Image (tube, grey):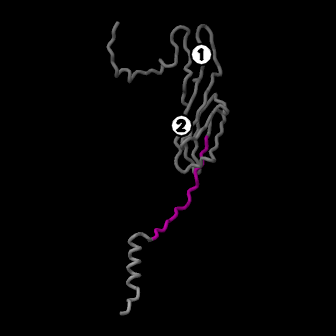
Amino acid sequence: MLSLYRPLESLFRDDFWNRGFETMGTGLARHTEMWTPTVDVVEKEGAYLIKAELPGVKPEEIEINITNNVLTLQGERKEEKEEEKDGYRRTERMVGTFRRSFTLPQGTNLDEIEASAEHGVLTVRIPKVIAEAPKKVEVKSGGFLDKAKKVVTQGLKAPQPRA
């Protein structure tokens, strides 16, 4: 049977339930490609804090890289518990790789960034650079007009030749 093609309907269709789940045959299978951890970014007096919820990810399986002033968190969460019975398979957690990137603001101290993981929460501390007092730069004369004035004034002060 033919159906009318309606391209705008695909914009509003919720494909969440159609992605990564096998709905035919043996039952549900969990999506294993990519997931996005929730992240809080907080600015404190002396540092920026990035807190990422990474339950089930071991600290040694988390990579933190900085390239061109962009901090990237990445890693993979593997299945911990799986249950199969009566023709279905069940897992409780999304598994797969994750990657989150953050552009660091100017004035961050890249050499002293610290990271720690506790109870499934990764905390990255990015210290701010202590701002120095503004410096005033003195503008010196010495341009073309100043040199010309100097030559003219020296010529006026030069002694007149005797005749």
- Disc tally is 2
Location of residue 147 in the rendering, given as x and y in whole percent from the top left corner: 41, 73
- Residue at x 63%, y 24% (from the top left corner): 78
Q: Nearer the viewer, residue 54 or 151?
A: 151
Residue ID for mark 1 = 90
Q: Mark 2 points at which residue?
A: 101
Q: Residue furthest top?
A: 1
Magenta stretch: residue 132 in it?
yes
Magenta span: helix, strand or loop, mainly? loop
On screen, residue 131 above or below 125? below
> Which range is magenta?
124-140
Height in image: 130 above or below 72? below
Where residue 75 sits in the image (x, y, percent)? Answer: 60, 30
The part of the image, by quadrant, that contains residue 159 is bottom left
Q: Is mark 2 on a helix, strand or loop?
A: strand
Q: Give the vertical position of 85 relative to 70 (above or below).
A: above
Of the two numbered discs 1 and 2 on the same chain, state the one appearing first in sequence: 1
Task: Give the quarter of the image for residue 152.
Answer: bottom left
